[in-house]
Image (cartoon, helix red, strand yellow):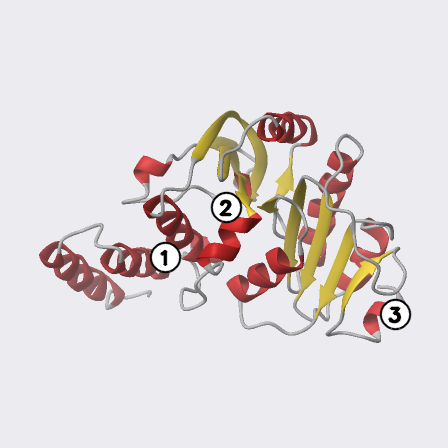
Amino acid sequence: MAGSICGNPGRMLDRGSSGDAPRAPEPVSIVTINRNDAAGLARTLRSIQALRALRPVEQVIVDGASTDGSLQVIAAEAPAGPGTVVVSEPDAGIYDAMNKGWRAARGRHVAFVNAGDEVLPGPFAAYLDFASAGDADVYYAKTLVRDPRSGATRVHERHPDQLHRDTVPHLTTLTRRALLERLGGFDERYRICADRDLFVRARTGAAGFRFFDEAVAVFELGGASSQKHRTRLEDLQISGAHRLIGPWRYRIRRALLALQALRPGR
């Protein structure tokens, strides 16, 4: 990464702007968080640059003080210029970094496309056009899920009325920044499933959701949310906290998860 960024690891920089001049807001900000995933980050940033050739979006990159060459990837793949913000400093986890990202953003809506994920430039551009014509608090679309070993993909689709048991993937959502502000962002007590908690709180608070019926991004299996037992336990905690399941069902499921944790190989 450029020397000015490496020399100020805790400073937020608007690359290409001078001093503290205010940034002109774009309709959408894309937040990318990363820690020591230089190869995945390169794929992500290249896909976003291809999108930026089609539509104006702000790019916010939050790097957790990586030591693997990620800063050099950012310097190469996210050219300096108005509308590019880079933060590099230690963080307290995925959702701490994502909270830093949306708070640094200036777009009306915020997307979260993290290192290793990729936007599909053409479909995502159409998605942005769709969102710009409406007034929903949260837009959501289909996701392509890719197996890193075989390269095979499948379409993943979830809706707000399924939040009692699953989540709308944050990768293919555009969430109004004012809503994130009102809800306080992601609850950092959750380490894997805070996105589901956020969308449950949004829906409970009467936020408007609108669906775009096309796959607009690629999620590669293998991240934190792929840790099945921990994900199920945190999902259960969220269901209990929001009373999405009754107390007896919660206790039974908690006991079953505890038994599963005792199985050999866990």
At horizontal 36% and vertical 42% (from top left) the residue drawn is 206
As drawn, is 200 to the left or to the right of 250?
Answer: right
As drawn, is 182 to the left or to the right of 3?
Answer: left
Which three-letter amino acid code belongs to the residue tagged 1? Answer: Thr
Classify mark 2: helix, strand or loop: helix
Pointer 2 with pointer 3, Cβ within 8 A: no
Residue 125: x, y in percent?
Answer: 67, 29
Which three-letter amino acid code belongs to the residue tagged 2? Answer: His
Q: Which numbered marker is on residue 4?
A: 3
Q: Nearer the viewer, mark 3 or mark 1?
A: 3
Residue 215 appears in the figure = yes
Q: Which residue is mark 2?
A: 170
How far apart marks 2 and 1 lie (CA) works out to: 15 Å
Q: 243 or 21: which is nearer to us? A: 21
Task: Answer above or below: position of 91 versus 233.
Answer: below
Image quarter where the N terminus lies is bottom right
